[in-house]
Amino acid sequence: MKKEIKKFLKFNDKTIYFVTANGQYWIALKPICEALNVNWNRQFQNLKNDEILGAVFAKQQMQAPDNQLRNYVALPEFFVYGWIFQIQSASPELLKYKWECYKVLYEHFHGAIAGRKDLLTIKAKAQVEIYSVMNRLDPEDALKIDRAQKKINAVNVKLRKLDTEIIEEEKTLFNT
């Protein structure tokens, strides 16, 4: 198993470390708690007792700030952001992070809903256009029908792709 040790990011003058092991990023948790100004011991106890996170955390050897290799409790990156979001503390640093999480979640889900609504509106307008033109058939109108049908087909492809992406994202929540 090849491991590569790197710095993850700087946050509040703290370095957050990660290691890649077997193609997966493992993020050290204690430096995150220090950067967010939350109690590490309490968060570690909560982590161990969590039904999902308790099963996936592990100790990973990483380079500490003093350049020594140390064992850190770590989570795969996939779980880190949700773990941070569930931390309970009045820490201003944590509250700032949670505000960002709410914004990102809203933008993701609202974007999916609004995007679908926009596509359905385009499809409905194209269908209305087809029915309108069909009532006055002549050669020029036939071209308009053809263009509108092409719009419908393109939107249907986008809708299927969007639906597939949403379903795949939802499935990952249950497969972990």
Image (spheres, rainbow, N blue to C red):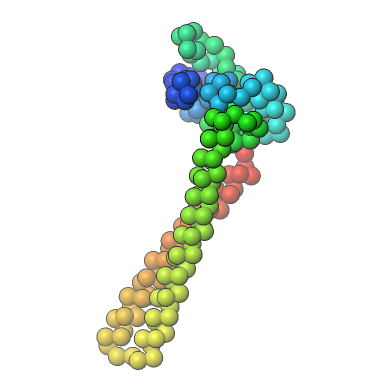
Seen at 45% across and 70% down, the residue is: 121
Q: Is 158 situated left or right of 48 in this image?
A: left
160 with respect to 94 (left or right): left
Residue 55, image quadrant: top right
Q: What x and y, as percent, mark residue 61?
A: 54, 15
Seen in the picture, residue 63 relative to 127 is either above or below; the reply is above
- Seen at 48% across and 60% down, the residue is 114
Query: Can you say which quadrant of the picture contains the C terminus?
Result: top right
Q: How many marks?
A: 0
User: Looking at the rendering, which quadrant does residue 80 occupy?
Assistant: top right
Q: Position of residue 112 (x, y in %)?
A: 50, 55
Q: 158 or 39, which is in the foreground?
A: 39
Can residue 162 be seen in this snapshot? yes
Horizontal and vertical percent position of residue 124 = 45, 74
Residue 18, image x, y percentages = 49, 23
Please say whether residue 22 is visible from this viewpoint. Answer: no
Residue farthest left in this picture: 140
Identify whether 49 is placed above or below 136: above
Q: Which residue is more in the foreground, 126 or 23? A: 126
- Residue 144 higher or lower than 150, as above or below: below
Q: Nearer the viewer, residue 164 or 121?
A: 121
Q: Residue at x 50, y 29 (%)?
A: 24
Q: What residue is drawn where x is 72% and y is 28%?
A: 49
Residue 30 in the image: above or below residue 164? above
